[in-house]
Image: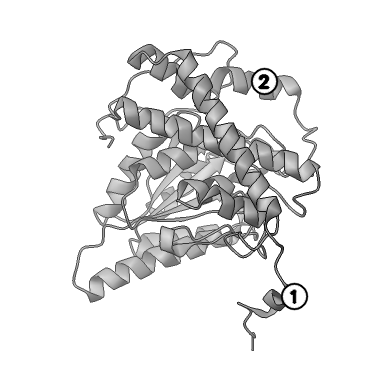
Amino acid sequence: MPTASTAAAMKTASVPPQKTAKASAPISATFTKAELQHWHKTMLEMRRFEEKAAALYQQKAIQGFCHLYIGQEAVAAGLKAISHAGDDFITSYRCHALALVCGLSMLEVMGELTGRVVGISKGKGGSMHMFEPSKGFWGGHGIVAAQVPLGAGISFARKYEAEVLNQPNTRVCFTLIGDGAMNAGQVFETFNMAALWKLPTVFVIENNQYGMGTSVPRAAAGELYKRGECFGIPGEKVDGMDFLAVAEAAKRAADWCRAGKGPYLLEMDTYRYRGHSMSDPAKYRTRDDVENVREGRDPIARLQRLLMEQHGVVESYFEEVDEAVKAVVNECAEAALAAPQPSEAELWTDVYPHA
């Protein structure tokens, strides 16, 4: 697991896209070669899965809303890599990749996307509503910023439970927030309560540069990672396209929370390659904008270069892994589409009256 001896390394400004890619510099976060290979494969699984989802959406096998995570894989992987057993995760509607990294099977996620009974919500929730608390995954929420107070609530429950049992609380809730949600009022209300009660919450802003079709500088004043300062919540900006940088910053933040010091705020400087959702043509940016990021900052390519340059892994290894991942994803898609849709009786299960 990573250590945290380079606290200032990631307190930097946003890294601009560059056409000339550079390998990630070695940092104090220590992962073995096998661990790095595992996380490279994990990120590749996220991407190939999302690409398959895009193809199925275009074929109308997936309908409704569908928000892809392509380009942001290092954030989910880096957070999970340093998490402890019992930690919790909650996110917005861009949730497929986090569901996978938390331990949901590809079939459970793809089945949900295609509306089949093998889906994690029996095919009734779709792209934005996946949920498996037994694996520490609390969703998948379609309402902008709704997950933020829920994440604090999970942290409150963990802290309160530990106090009742007279035990130290070491469980952290990683609460992921989109940059567009950062202007919602409940975010600031949550920051206030989390700070007052010293809740063990790592608030993770996934700043992929656009809230739907509006660039962040046009919609949000100031630096997002400083939004917690008035509440006494420390924050920092992280290169969210670098797995190692994410892992080290996340460990530093989680250690702060586990020590009972309260919440911590991380702004992940990342980028989504696709539109806000599958219905978004993304005409607010040029193809060159996206390609510049792909060439210079792609998280999977960066970790691959690190493995090649520092651990001697040959290129043929990555080709074999990619082919194997594609085969698994294709098999998963076929199995999902072969599964039945929910019966009419399922419309009335798991539904509760609201007085």
Estimate the x, y position of residue 143 in percent, counting from the top left.
65, 61
The one nearer the camera, 152 or 223, is 152
Amino acid type, mark 1: Glu
Which of the 4 image quarters holds residue 145? bottom right
Estimate the x, y position of residue 72 in percent, counting from the top left.
55, 36
Residue labelled with disc 2: 291
The one nearer the camera, 189 or 41, is 41
The one nearer the camera, 3 or 221, is 3
Which residue is found at the position 65% from the left and 52% from the top? Answer: 336
List the single residue furthest toward the bottom: 355
Amino acid type, mark 2: Glu
**Is residue 288 shown above or below 259?**
above
Residue 325 - label = none
**Is residue 32 shown above or below 260?**
above
- Specify whether residue 194 is in view: yes
* SS at circle 2: helix
Estimate the x, y position of residue 308 in percent, counting from the top left.
41, 14
Q: Residues within 10 Å of mark 2 (few under 14, many from 20)?
A: some
Q: How many marks?
A: 2
Estimate the x, y position of residue 320 in percent, counting from the top left.
51, 23
Residue labelled with disc 1: 344
Which residue is found at the position 37% from the left and 36% from the top? Answer: 247
The one nearer the camera, 319 or 214, is 319
Which residue is found at the position 67% from the left and 46% from the top? Answer: 334
